[in-house]
Image (spheres, grey):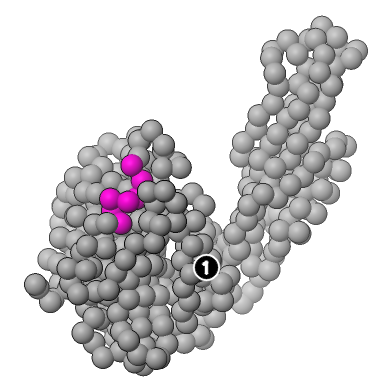
Amino acid sequence: MRSNFLSNTEVLELLQVLVRTPSINPTLAPDASHGEEALAVCARDWLLERGVEAWLEHVATGRPNVVAQVGEGDGPTLIFCAHIDTVSTEGMNIPPFEPLVEGDRVYGRGSYDMKGGVAAAMVAAAALKNQDLAGRVKLALVVDEEHSSIGADHFVANHTGDACIVTEPTEGRLILTHKGFVWVRLTTSGTAAHGSRWDLGVSAIGKMGNIIAGLKRFDQEELRQRPRPRPSPDVGPASLHAALVKGGVGISTYAPSCELQVERRTLPGETVEGVVEELERIVARSGEEARIEAFFDRQPLVCDPGSKLASCVRDSAIAELGEAPEETGVAYWTDAAIFAAAGIPALNYGPGGDGAHAAVEWVSLCSVVSTAKVLAEAARRFCY
């Protein structure tokens, strides 16, 4: 068995195996997916063959996380986390599961988001197996990040650690902050009547239309103009949009009800309760009434740039690449926030490329290799 796990050859071979193994999220594409299980088995077996303790933990039917561990010391535990699910291949104009290599680019669905990060975490763990770590490194290769992150939820409910590096693609940047989000359901009620009976009917859709107009004004004229919290890295303004709407029972009937689902992207310090109160004021301002229910939320991420975790990744990047990584925030959400909410400091650091969820997707092989080297060095520094 080869031992140079951090070589371009070893990393490329693993990355190509991962891309060839479909792992489309079954919730997003139930008719086009077999789920993540085949990839989970593949990843577990690769680790076991290289002497890394690894096993599956079933989160839902046919949807297992891969958990692995190296090191047996009593020192700190560092977690490498990466999601193994991808979005569908609909609209792609390259073969999604044929990992073509052109120069430094490796193409295919999930190559960038985020099988490059999966490969980096796996080879880093394998490279650390025979190191004399004072602590431990755990792998959390999780399902379902592309929908509702049941995999990360399951991992933090059953495991702990002292810090976590999520290897989402970051172009080699150190991502210390990102937004959260709240999903809210608004429901208006009308009076059903025949379409000819304007004197009796009240359209719940018409009521919702006034609310939607109010939401748009609030988003553009107020929400995006608010000052952002400092001194954490800027993640852009808070935002809100009307995402899904349904209502009515027939074209010749006044709609008795209408439901709108809204997504509100939140900044550090904002709360679900504050978002609901905000929406209550917007509805009242529109002159309408609606039932408002927050039904799902994820917290923003904030990682202290002076923390041991950030310092270890920063110093490791300098040691491996010769320069400090850019430190910033991003507008999108990642599983790192789940670890932070569980009391495990977390940040994002991963490879570069392009095409997440897009028609053409690729990852830079050199950046996957350098990410793996930075991860391994960060573990040696953190798990002293």
Placement of the C terminus among the 4 image quadrants = bottom left
Q: Position of residue 241 (x, y in %)?
A: 64, 44
Q: Relative to the observer, which residue lies in front, 65 or 238? A: 65
Specify whether residue 7 is painted magenta.
no
226 left or right of 168?
Answer: right
Q: Residue at x 73, y 30 (%)?
A: 258
Using a 10 Å C-alpha cutoff, classify the residue at mark 1 as few (fewer than 14 neighbours), some (14 to 19) or many (20 or more). few
Q: Residue at x 26, y 91 (%)?
A: 132
348 left or right of 236?
Answer: left
254 left or right of 47?
Answer: right
The residue sitting at the top extreme is 196
Tag 1 residue:
157
Q: How many marks?
A: 1
In the rendered image, the vertical position of residue 134 relative to residue 275, given as above or below: below
Q: Amino acid at mark 1?
A: Ala
Q: Position of residue 199 (x, y in %)?
A: 90, 12
What span is colored magenta in the figure? 34-40
**Circle 1: element type:** helix
Q: Position of residue 72 (x, y in %)?
A: 32, 86
In the rendered image, the vertical position of residue 132 relative to residue 57, given as above or below: below
Residue 177 in sight here = no
Q: Relative to the observer, which residue lies in front, 151 or 108? A: 151
371 left or right of 239?
Answer: left
Q: Position of residue 356 (x, y in %)?
A: 37, 50
Q: Residue at x 34, y 62 (%)?
A: 56
The residue sitting at the right extreme is 199
Q: Residue at x 38, y 56 (%)?
A: 64
